Amino acid sequence: MSHDDKRIREFAYQIWESEDRPEGQHDRHWEMARKLAQAEALAPAKAAKPKAAAKPKAPAEKKPRAPRKPAAS
């Protein structure tokens, strides 16, 4: 069994389980899984790499607020 077939089988099983294990849907699940595996294989390699840590932003300077008006009685 090739790696692709194994991945398709895993996807098909996950789809089958997510649909509460219906009978008679093998062909549809397999086709959906094949498309998912194909999309996964075509995805950019950078998606598999962890993101670099973002640089911390400098805190924004706070502007002084205008004084509040007293609430009307």
Image (tube, rainbow, N blue to C red):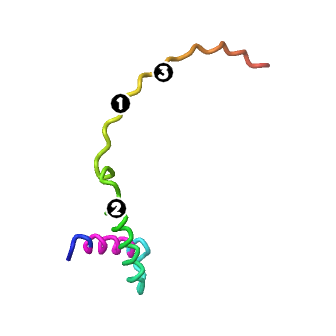
Q: Can residue 28 be found in the magenta stretch?
A: no
Q: Which mark is residue 55?
A: 1
Residue displayed at 52% across by 17% down:
62
Between 48 and 42, the one nearer to me in the picture: 42
Secondary element at image label 3: loop
Q: Is residue 56 left or right of residue 7?
A: right
Residue 52, given in percent of the width and then of the height, sits at 31, 39
Q: Residue at x 50, y 17 (%)?
A: 61
Q: Residues in magenta?
A: 5-16
Percent across and percent down for residue 34 are: 35, 73
Identify the element where label 2 is drawn. Answer: helix
| Front: mark 3 or 2 | 2
- Quadrant housing the N terminus: bottom left
Q: CA distance from mark 3 to mark 1?
A: 15 Å
Assess whether mark 2 and mark 1 are in contact (beta carbons under 8 angstroms): no
On residue 42, the disc is: 2
Where does the image place residue 44, in percent across and percent down from the top left? Answer: 34, 54
